Amino acid sequence: MDSSPTQTPSEKLEAWLRYYDDLNLGAFYTDRRTMGRRSIKSAAKNAPASSLAIEPAIVSDPPKTVVPIITPPVSVLRVVDAPSLFEAIDRIEGDTLERIREDLGECTRCRLHEQRNKIVFGAGNPRAELVFVGEGPGHDEDVQGLPFVGRAGKLLTQMIEAMGLTRDQVYICNVVKCRPPENRKPEDDEVATCSPYLYRQLDAIAPKAIVCLGGTAAQALLKTKDSISRFRGTWFDFRNTKLLATYHPAYLLRNPAAKGEVWKDLQKVMAHLGLQPKKSSS
């Protein structure tokens, strides 16, 4: 934009208006509700006298165009609209549970190995249609090297049998393979370190349904920080299968009244798999 000392105030204003018009800012000094898009010369001619007295020199920089940021509505569980998050771990063609266990080795990849007794990899049918995923091993699991063998494990066995199945027909594993000290919740970095092996397990088994037991398992697989109470009993698409979260058996031991809710969740799983509940003996 050129400005000559000999230009009149009207000519200077016209020059500045042309500059702003080149920036696609349009006329900005009057009411846009009544003005619309005028020609530059007409705008300069009809501008208020006070505006003609303004020297362009006081304008330091052309005003910047402000682009509004449009925030989409937040759903209860944001990952529902972003299933690609579930594909964060690449699939390994022809992977097997035996190969995954071999690759895991006597793992020392995170601090959990420091106090563990045994790695709890998982147990059950390697071709199971149903997989249960828990949080991590407890004391009894750490001693035996098997998942869900303590009090919560006995309740899980009852839940499985009520569905008309046995433990040998399903597969059971945890997000982390080593017992957290004092049975604390696994830290985010511990979950991140161990999760790739869990993903590989699920891919190798290729079940028809995955049931997350408790918030930690659901949050790890669904990539969310939301409380399990906000999405419990809801089906999600997860790596070519269906995933549903329900309360952990340990929670049911502390809150027996929640057993009815869990049974409703398991009935959804049974309907998906075409299972009939176990008939009680008369």
Image: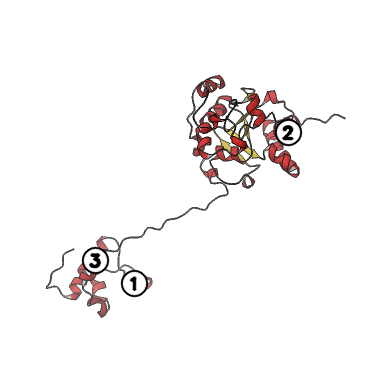
Question: Residue most toward the right?
Answer: 282
Q: Residues within 10 Å of mark 3 (few under 14, many from 20)?
A: few
Front residue of this view, candidates 256 and 28:
256
**Res 35 label:** 1
Q: How far apart are marks 3 and 2 (CA)?
A: 74 Å
Marks 3 and 2, the one that precedes in the sequence: 3
Q: Residues within 10 Å of mark 1 (few under 14, many from 20)?
A: few
Is 15 placed left or right of 127 in the picture? left
Marks 3 and 1, the one that precedes in the sequence: 1
Q: Do the residues labelled 3 and 1 touch (CB within 8 Å)?
A: no
Front residue of this view, candidates 158 and 105:
105
Amino acid residing under circle 1: Met
Label 1 element class: helix
* Residue carrying label 2: 155
Q: Quadrant of the N terminus?
A: bottom left
Is 58 placed left or right of 140 in the picture? left
What residue do we see at 53% from left, 43% from top?
79
Please count the marks in the image.
Answer: 3
Look at the image and tell me whether residue 33 can be seen.
Answer: yes
Front residue of this view, candidates 145 and 202:
145
Q: Position of residue 140 (x, y in %)?
A: 67, 29
